[in-house]
Image: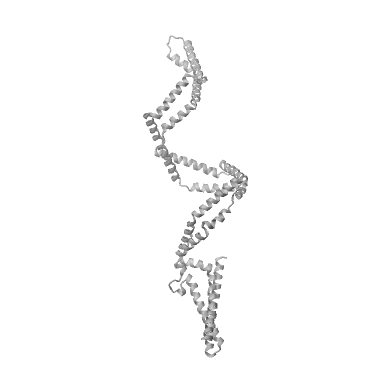
Amino acid sequence: MNLSSKKKQLYRYKALATGLFILMAIVFIITTLLQKNNPAHWIGYLRAFSEAAMVGALADWFAVTALFNYPMGLKIPHTNLIENSKQRIGDNLGNFVVENFVSAGNIRPYIEKIELSNTISKWLVKEHNQKLFIEEASLWIENGIEQIDDLVVTTFIAKKVQALSDQLPLNEILSGGIDYLIENNEHQAIITQLSIKVKDYITDHQQLIQEKVSAESYSFIPQFIDHKIASKISSGLIRFIEDIIQESSHPIRTEIAKNIRQFSYDLRHTLKWNETLEKAKSSFLSSSKIQQYSGDIWANLKSGILEELRKPNSTLKKQIQNSLQQFAQQLNSDPSLQRKLDHWIRYNSYKLILKNAQKVSELISNTVGNWEGKELSRKLELEVGKDLQFIRINGTIVGGLVGLIIYTIAHLFL
């Protein structure tokens, strides 16, 4: 029922109750006049009924009116109760709702009936619903990301990086990485690759070697001898490097591994290397540079995520849809997973409702307390005013009957 209909209904029943009072007043006036000139007993009974009915009607009118307004504008104590007691009403109403509707005992039977896993799986297994879910979720995430203060995120990242860098022992990390390579024999591949590069360089630059040998040779030595020497040097170096490449236990490899271990030890235990690395870290990870790096990281991350969210068929959305499809199929075919999901939903729903029960009470209390007093009275009168008019009507009738009974007893027995 809309507001207009409620108002019309209230005015109609008010008019009915008031009309009944006016009728009793007219009857009282007529019977009073008749009784002066006509001693008929029935007139006395009718007059007693109408008189008592008027008293009952007025008393109940006062009681009903006192709930919502000052009767006839007179500020009589304990009247206009709704407006004057709105905060207490709000508090009591909030507590009543929580104690009788949001209590653990009342919500538990409904929570235990929750079985959403089957519904979720059937809904998610449809491709159209998957795309709908992804699009809606993308909009939520996109709006959330766009509303994030970039400076706040950048500052947060910078603080975390700064805190991490302050505790970052570069010498321990580098030394540990080198030790890992040695222990897992990974350094051998590095030595092999470097040797291949050196061999290729010598092979490709034999002319340069010849020129260097000729430049360092004596002038009286023929050039073909210099070339022969340069060729021997090149071929000897190539064979030496090939031996290193082919022999995993070559002495050069052993020597290199020994030097690498020594370097790792020096990194970890010598003050010189520790100071050098700390200076490099301080230079590379200064506060201004960390802030700049953090801003660049967040800007790239943000733009990348937004780009993926806005593309109709982005890789991210496809991956999410595949995951949803797999989850829906597994959920649809796995009763154990359904029970776990339903239990999780029940548990968290129960916990969430009980946790926020007091907030429901506060919401009702604050809402009612913040209403204008007249507005609250008007709202309540529109909701229950029609029924309260029956109190006036009943008061008129019951008052008249009581008055009639009293008059009858007094006339017959006293």
Residue projecting furthest to the front: 413
**Residue 301 coordinates in the image, percent (x, y):** 49, 41
Q: Residue at x 53, y 86 (%)?
A: 412
Q: Quadrant of residue 172?
A: top left
Q: Quadrant of the N terminus?
A: bottom right
* Residue 219, image x, y percentages: 43, 10
| Picture layout, residue 292 above or below residue 57 | above
Asked whether residue 326 is in view, the answer is yes
| Residue 346 picture location, percent across and down | 55, 51
Q: Residue at x 43, y 25 (%)?
A: 261
Pick the residue in front: 210 or 176.
Answer: 176
Q: How many marks?
A: 0
Q: Which residue is found at the position 56% from the left and 56% from the top?
A: 109
Q: Can residue 25 be seen by looking at this rendering? A: no
Q: Position of residue 351 (x, y in %)?
A: 51, 52
- In the picture, measured across the screen, residue 127 lies left or right of residue 396, that is right
Front residue of 96/161: it is 96
Foreground residue among 249 and 237: 249
319, 385: nearer the viewer? 385
Report the colour scheme: one colour
For residue 185, above or below residue 227 = below
Image quarter of residue 30? bottom right
